Image (spheres, rainbow, N blue to C red):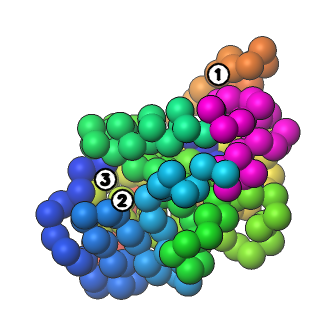
């Protein structure tokens, strides 16, 4: 399951909107039956299993093949982006340990991306993780708009977007060339209403 392709406030916990819990020493979001946490060196082998997949290679800009060296480069890049407050990458887990996929928020663009490993699909992990990150982006980061960028033929990801409360935007499709193919990306958006913001 592939979706498209952030300053953390110094508070020990934030509750209220769906009881999203945040630990700023190591970002951790707990809601919708999931625990989203930052990646560590212990995840390198699992990252290879999740990302070294033909579908992931086709739908994302990740390296392919995605071996140990690629996993280490990716983790270091994610850690640097977090330190610079550019992006947050969180492992999708149900127990706080075993990574089943990954979710990221790009603070500059307001875009969220997600991947769920092939062996873990069919559990609504992507929908639940997307809702969690969207709530966090809306209420804690206070982004006025959160977006996904999805290929028109990526029907599973479109279904996730709809289930998580996103709708097609009026933006023109973006044309991207990557790994020798050119394709369009449609923008899906989520905007919090005044009532939802409280």
The residue at which mark 1 appears reads as: 175
The residue at which mark 2 appears reads as: 137
Q: Is residue 62 magenta?
A: yes
Residue at 72% across, 35% down: 66
Residue at 30% across, 72% down: 22
Assess whether mark 2 and mark 1 are in contact (beta carbons under 8 angstroms). Answer: no
Q: Is residue 162 left or right of residue 192?
A: right
Dot 1 or dot 2: first in sequence order is 2
Residue at 78% across, 66% down: 121
**Nearest-to-viewer mark from 1 and 2:** 2
Q: How many marks?
A: 3
Mark 3 vs mark 2, CA separation in Å: 6 Å
Q: Is residue 121 above or below residue 14?
A: above
Residue 198: x and y in percent read 24, 78
Q: Which residues are magenta?
A: 46-69
The residue at which mark 3 appears reads as: 143
Mark 1 vs mark 2, CA separation in Å: 26 Å
Residue 103: x and y in percent read 54, 55
- Counting other residues with Cα less than 10 Å from the Cα at mark 2, is it few (<14), some (14-19), or many (20 or more)? many
Residue 152: x and y in percent read 76, 40
Front one among 53 and 107: 53
């Amino acid at each position: 399951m592939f979706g498209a392709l952030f300053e953390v406030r110094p508070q020990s916990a934030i509750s209220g909107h769906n009881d999203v819990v945040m630990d700023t020493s190591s970002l951790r979001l707990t809601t919708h039956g999931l625990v989203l946490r930052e990646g560590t060196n212990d995840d390198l082998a699992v990252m290879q299993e999740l990302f070294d997949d033909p579908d992931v290679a086709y739908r994302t800009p990740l390296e392919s093949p995605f071996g140990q060296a690629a996993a280490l480069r990716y983790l270091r890049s994610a850690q640097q982006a977090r330190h610079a407050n550019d992006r947050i990458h969180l492992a999708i887990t149900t127990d706080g340990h075993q990574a089943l996929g990954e979710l990221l928020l790009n603070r500059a663009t307001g875009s969220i991306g997600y991947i769920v490993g092939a062996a873990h699909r069919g559990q609504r992990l992507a929908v639940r993780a997307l809702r969690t990150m969207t709530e966090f982006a809306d209420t804690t980061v206070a982004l006025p708009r959160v977006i996904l960028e999805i290929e028109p033929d990526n029907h599973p990801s479109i279904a996730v977007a709809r289930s998580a409360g996103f709708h097609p935007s009026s933006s023109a499709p973006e044309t991207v060339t990557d790994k020798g193919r050119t394709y369009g990306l449609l923008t899906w958006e989520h905007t919090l209403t005044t009532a939802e913001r409280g």
